[in-house]
Image: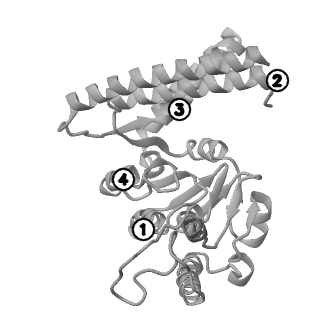
Amino acid sequence: MEFLSNYGLFLAQAVTIVVAIVAVLIAMVALGTKGKSEKGQLDLINLTDELEEAADSFRGTILSKDELKKRAKAKKKQAKEDKSSPSEDALSNLFVIDFNGSMAANEVEGLRREITAVVQCAQKGDEVLVRLESPGGVVHGYGLAASQLQRITKRDIPLTIAVDKVAASGGYMMACIANKIVAAPFAIIGSIGVIAQIPNFSKVLKKNDIDFEQVTAGQYKRTLTMFGENTDQDREKFQTEIDDVHGLFKNHVAKHRTQLDMEKVATGETWYGEQALEIGLVDELSTSDDWLLDAAKDKTVYLVKFSVPKTLSQKLGKAASTSIEHSLINTWQRMTQWRSF
């Protein structure tokens, strides 16, 4: 035990030194880059070509030379036929957008730029697929994200939402905008509800003879508070505000998914994909990969991606936090024989 204690102390000292050095480096880099604007980049990646290249690579290994020659001839013949008699379907596109939402919905900025690019160049016959993953978050952030998706449907561009893992609460607020919702069998769907929670430290302050004062103008400028004493009137008003938001959420979903029994689904519960299909929360069971492969037969598929290059200070900070996290986990595993699966 003494060895483990000494080892733990040594590790803590080492980590402290590393953190201090990294903090100084980050501060120096941040000062050097202060005032420089970060310009994002919007990329259009041809997923159809990537899919075909991957398939051809596998076929080159699996098929015989004769089979490969036959496929090459058939492909060449098909290309000539398509060129001589082009169809409207061959010219249509499927634009793919990925949205992996955080609690604060910070990813809305990228979504806004991606959708702006799509709606400006989309033509008749084009469609949009949004691969959505989010457990929800702040009301105003996901409300804006849902409004961004409405920019697609308002222009009569077919929109499909694919959920492989989770689209709950704010995530479902976004998903219900779509003309079609596709979900994996065990994806988590629903949570049409609202939650707010706040700790209260008034008893702790009283126990330590600490006064807390707060000045407001307006009867309901402040309802529940972290440091003052909350009254039944405060709680009642706060509950009313939560109920109002829930009502807006239910109306929003009902507007876009008219077939739903809102009394049944707007309880804050979640359902897995198969269950969600039965009650109408989703329209089809499929992974986004299979749905995309089917769509690629008739459309050219493009991934639309907005990204902001990370600064050197951000990269250093990420590397430092990852290194420290791994070190602590490894040490904990050695000391406790803990294992994950």
Q: CA distance from mark 1 to mark 4?
A: 12 Å
User: Which numbered tag is attached to residue 170?
Assistant: none
User: Farthest residue toward the top?
Assistant: 65
Decide which of tag 3 and tag 1 comes sooner along the chain: 3
Residue at screen point 50% across, 64% down: 138
Residue 69, placed above or below residue 320: above
Residue at screen point 51% across, 75% down: 228
Disc 3 and disc 4 in contact, CB within 8 angstroms? no
Of residue 139 and residue 231, the one placed in the foreground of this image is 231
Decide which of tag 2 and tag 4 comes sooner along the chain: 4
Mark 3 vs mark 1, foreground winner is 1
Residue 304, placed above or below residue 51: below
Q: CA distance from mark 3 to mark 2?
A: 61 Å
User: Which numbered tag is attached to residue 109?
Assistant: 4
Q: Quadrant of residue 72?
A: top right
Could you say where residue 237 lies in the image, as x and y percent from the top left? 53, 87
Mark 1 vs mark 2, foreground winner is 2
| Residue at the spot of label 2 | 337
Amino acid type at mark 2: Gln
Could you say where residue 103 lies in the image, as x and y percent from the top left? 52, 55
Decide if residue 196 is on the left or right side of residue 104: right
Amino acid type at mark 1: Ser
Q: Element type at marker 3?
A: helix
Could you say where residue 272 lies in the image, as x and y percent from the top left? 76, 59
Please state, as top left, top right, bottom left or bottom right, where the C terminus lies in the image.
Answer: top right
| Residue at the spot of label 3 | 78
